[in-house]
Image (cartoon, rainbow, N blue to C red):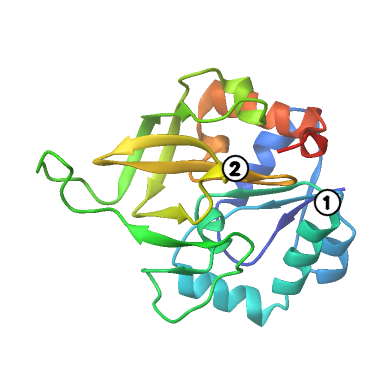
């Protein structure tokens, strides 16, 4: 069973629709028992770091997410949920994240390296640059354009987890993978053909069993 984590984060309908378009079924649930039985967890996210962590804790979902990742079963995070995997965020000082990946979440700088003003949040299409091959992102091609909506970006302590970057004033991390845990800052469910190619690879291959 593919389970979509329901913690009031929004944007779940388009995720579910993208999965259904490829002939798979996903159950939207906040029930810790159902989530614990899932063969794959999809962890979407929109909103604010501190509020999202509060909802996860209120619903008793922190331990469920950690146990799923520890079990080796595939785990896919989207947008804010990528950020929640890390230790902490500038968006909510003092609020610990899930700590599944070491690192911090930073706000985009208001000016780029050339001194030009940077639009915050980044809303719209941007081009990926793959940093590693042998991951599901290969299905999108070398320089896919995907859809972003965010003001913050992750800064992993371990650069080896980075699988793709993009540039918005500064170069930032667009996706990460460590073994069975894969998360992206962009919205594959809103990224047209490239996004569907990624979903197809996530659902149709055993990517989590490859050394990564």
| Quadrant location of the C terminus in the rendered image | top right
Q: Nearer the viewer, residue 16 or 155?
A: 155
Q: How many marks?
A: 2
Circle 2 SS class: helix
Identify the residue shown where x is 58% and y is 45%: 161
Residue 200 in picture, x, y percent from top left: 71, 27
In the displayed structure, 164 sits above or below 141; it is: below
Q: Callout 2 environment at 10 Å: few (<14), some (14 to 19), or many (20+)?
A: some
Q: Residue at x 55, y 51 (%)?
A: 11
Label 1 neighbourhood size at 10 Å, few (<14), some (14-19), many (20+)? Answer: some
* Residue 32 visible in the picture: yes
Identify the residue at horizontal 28%, vertical 53% (top origin): 108
Residue 41 picture location, percent across and down: 75, 52
Task: Give 188 or 107, whichever is nearer the viewer.
Answer: 107
Which of the two discs, 2 and 1, sits closer to the camera? 1
Is there any visible trace of residue 61 in the rendered image? no
User: Where's residue 66, x and y in %?
Assistant: 74, 66
In the figure, 159 relative to 88: above or below?
above
Q: Secondary structure at mark 1?
A: loop
Q: In the rendering, which numbered label is found on residue 14?
A: 2
Residue holding disc 1: 72
> Label 2, label 1: how many angstroms apart (C-alpha)?
26 Å
Which of the marked residues, 2 or 1, is nearer the chain's N terminus? 2
Q: Quadrant of residue 123?
A: top left
In this picture, residue 7 sits left or right of residue 168: right
Apparent side of residue 79 relative to residue 118 in the rendered image (left or right)? right
In this rendering, the answer to whether 19 lies above or below 52 is: above
Q: Residue at x 33, y 54 (%)?
A: 151
Q: Is residue 84 left or right of residue 150?
A: right
Q: Tell me if 50 is positioned left or right of 121 in this view.
A: right
Q: Which mark is residue 24?
A: none
């Amino acid at each position: 069973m593919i389970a979509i984590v329901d913690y009031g984060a929004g944007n779940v309908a388009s995720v579910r629709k993208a999965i259904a378009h490829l002939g798979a079924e996903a159950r939207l649930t906040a029930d810790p028992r159902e989530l614990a039985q899932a063969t794959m967890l999809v962890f979407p996210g929109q909103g604010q770091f501190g509020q999202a962590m509060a909802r996860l804790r209120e619903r008793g979902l922190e331990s469920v997410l950690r146990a799923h990742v520890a079990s080796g079963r595939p785990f896919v995070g989207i947008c804010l949920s990528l950020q929640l995997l890390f230790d902490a965020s500038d968006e909510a000082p003092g609020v610990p994240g899930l700590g599944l990946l070491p690192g911090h979440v930073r706000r985009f700088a208001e000016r780029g390296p050339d001194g030009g003003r940077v639009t915050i949040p980044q809303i719209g299409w941007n081009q990926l640059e793959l940093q590693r091959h042998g991951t599901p992102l290969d299905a999108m091609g070398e320089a896919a354009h995907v859809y972003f909506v965010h003001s913050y970006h992750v800064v992993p302590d371990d650069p080896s987890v980075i699988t793709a970057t993009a540039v918005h004033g500064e170069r930032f991390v667009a996706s990460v993978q460590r073994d069975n845990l894969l998360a992206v800052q962009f919205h594959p469910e809103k990224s047209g053909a490239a996004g569907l190619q990624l979903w197809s690879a996530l659902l149709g291959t055993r990517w989590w069993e490859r050394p990564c």
